[in-house]
Amino acid sequence: MVSAGNEALWRARVFDERRAADVAALEEVRRQPDTVTLDHRARLRDELSGLRDLPDRRIVDEPCRWVHYPWRRELVGIIGPQSFSLVRLDRNRNKITRDEQARLRRLRVGIVGLSVGNAIAQALALEGLCGELRLADFDSIDLSNLNRIPVGITDVGVNKAVVAARRIAELDPYLSVSVHTAGVTDASVDAMVDGLDLVVEECDSLDVKMSVRRAARGRGIPVIMETTDRGLLDIERFDLEPQRPLFHGLLGDLDEASVAGLTAQEKIPYALALLSAAELSVKMAASLVEVGSTLSTWPQLGSEVLAGASAVATAVRRFGLGESLPSGRVRIDSGTLLNGLRDPLVDDDGSHSDIPESSVESAVAPTRPADGVEAVLEAIRWAPSGGNAQPWSLQVDGPLIHIHADRDRTSLMDVDGRATHVAIGAAVYNAKVAAAAHGILGHTVLLPDPDSVDLVATVTLGDHRNQFLAQRYPSMLERRTNRGVGARVPIDRGLEDALGDAARDEGGRLHLYTDPHELAAFGDVVGAADRIRYLTPMLHEQMIGELRWPGSDTARTGIDIRTLGLGNGEGAFLDVVRRSDVVTRLARWGAGEALGISARDRITSSSALGVVTVPGSRLEDYVRGGSAAEAVWVCAQENGFGVQPMSPVFLYARDSYDCVRLSDPFASELDALRVSMRGLLDLSGEESIALVLRLSHCPPETVRSARLPANRIRR
Ligand SMILES: Cc1cc2nc3c(=O)[nH]c(=O)nc-3n(C[C@H](O)[C@H](O)[C@H](O)COP(=O)(O)O)c2cc1C
């Protein structure tokens, strides 16, 4: 029987002052002399307006309500139902997104047995895992329940379902709850389960357990049960398997009629079969032997009840969201799991796993061979390249040094090899500087052989002298990427001119930006592109694949993470966002704004952003652009500035088709960013960006990313 009975015992009454009847009833409550009024409306409205990412700002105008709790004699002013739910469940996000919350609100759940079921009901209500709860228990609270039912001494003597319903109403007066104070009987079982999506069965009586399951199975409703000893969670998916035997068949073909006639003693073997006696904890098993002599009934611990509620809530959430939840049993046994305590820095074999900073191999650096040819080759070897891929191979033929593109060391961002050509352009500049320093400067021909597209440059050694280039030799060898966040020290006019000249001498043009607003505009574009780089699976995989953890591998390509200039907390952030499952989830949510913050902040905190462009868009233009960028880089570093290339992922895309190749899902967003970057630079026609450099005033970088050994890049 549904005991609508005295609903005032457990149902909070919600008043909406837009309704005349409610206004009158509210007045009546207010007139009761012992009513205490708590007006939380302003405070809750403040919380509501403080929420981030509100789906619709108009929600702040939702009318408030008054809620009367007769058993507390309290009248509380709160925000309306939708606002209430947004605020109350905001901290669920995004472990449970707003969309998922809405789906879960459609779930109708019945709980039979409100001892263990009390904690389960609270967990479901607390987490917002259902929109309707039906609670059934005939029993009332005893003092001896208070070791495991999280209620109070004032609840002793009150029906267990009523107590649970009250706490839920105090938590969320808008949640639809009904109460069956007669428990579940043969007569009421149909009314109890009819129309539910899920039943949680937590009663002690074998015949009620059976009749609840039979009624649920007949309606295709799944049943979840938790038996607290060693955290046994039990799932019966009658919705998916309408013929599935009750209790997985553990009780054979026993039915309610035969159970009803059994004495308590005779029921024990069945109860033990249900609990998998062999797997009971020792103390539980031994205690069962004592039941009836030194113990009145079997023991149950509050912590186990709460842990069981958490397991059930997790299962209900999976069910409600259509995630995997097959029929079966599992033990979520924290007692046993605690035996697995391990020192996080010690591997299973007892060795220490992590890499204390000091144990890292000492830094690598270029050498200064006396021999001119060797010096030129060494200078090329230490040229910068995207992701430190070193996409080149070298062939020495008398006075000729051929630099070939190595197509195996490329990436998605290297659209049509443009980044490779920029890197080789930087290598050509280095080669010229080393040659000049050794008095063997000659000339360079770009893409000398139309039949060999991989031959990007031939550096011919000669006997020219160029004092200006020769003087760059020490600083060229010292050049490195500096990713630190610096102080915004201004760049003086003289240096601006010198940087511009350096680019021009190599056939490029430097666009230099120092105005904070302009830096912010570039920062926004590069930051937004970085976000897309994280959220596109292949780009993310390649970006993370470029990173090298010191001591963890011997690859001599890629970027040593010690050179990332990671500030406080950024290392831990990287540990999160390097995970493909994490970024996939962010992409699914259309979220991840924070992924662009690091690039944006680095640009806005810089002294300047220098964009090196070239007049054309052929591959040889990109090679010249690389030389120009390297010349700017060396000059800036010589003058005390740290330099970091900041390559937005679209940097080497030339049109919308290239953007599709980079990231199908974000192609149009990328293309728009590409166009706005060109707009910020006011680029005309074929003018192309070779490299974007951020100049900042920060301490010199001490670590260098390694290079492949000379013999690995020689043909
Ligand atoms: C075409 C190109 C693109 C690059 N893009 C970036 C970038 O987006 N971010 C970055 O931190 N470094 C970038 N770099 C710098 C390289 O990662 C760096 O040169 C390489 O790791 C070698 O380290 P080093 O410059 O300290 O010798 C780029 C370099 C080149 C040549």
Image (cartoon, rainbow, N blue to C red):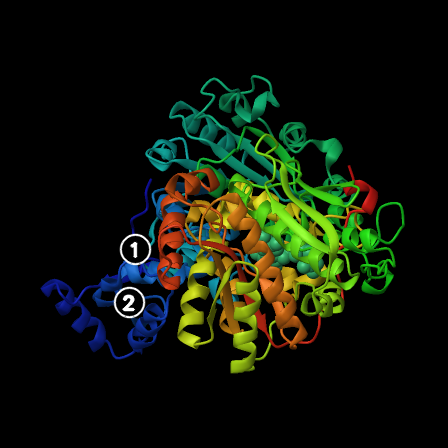
Secondary structure at badge 2 equals loop
**Lower position in the chain sequence, tag 1 or tag 2:** 1
Rate crowding at label 1 as few (under 14), some (14 to 19) or many (20 or more) other CA atoms within 10 Å: some
Q: Which residue, given by chain and number where applicable, does mark 1 sit on?
A: 7
Label annotation for residue 114: none
The answer to whether the residue labelled 1 contacts the one labelled 2, judged by CB atoms less than 8 Å apart, is no
Is residue 47 visible in this depiction of the protein? yes
Is residue 159 visible in this depiction of the protein? no
Q: CA distance from mark 1 to mark 2?
A: 23 Å
Disc 2 under 8 Å from ligand 1? The reply is no
Residue 183, quarter of the rendered image: top left
Label annotation for residue 79: 2
Q: Is residue 566 left or right of residue 419?
A: right
Secondary structure at badge 1 equals helix
Instruction: Point out residue 335 in the picture as x, y percentages from the top left corner.
Output: 74, 48
Q: Amino acid at mark 1?
A: Glu
- Name the residue nearer the viewer: 68 or 607: 607
Marks 1, 2: nearer the viewer: 2
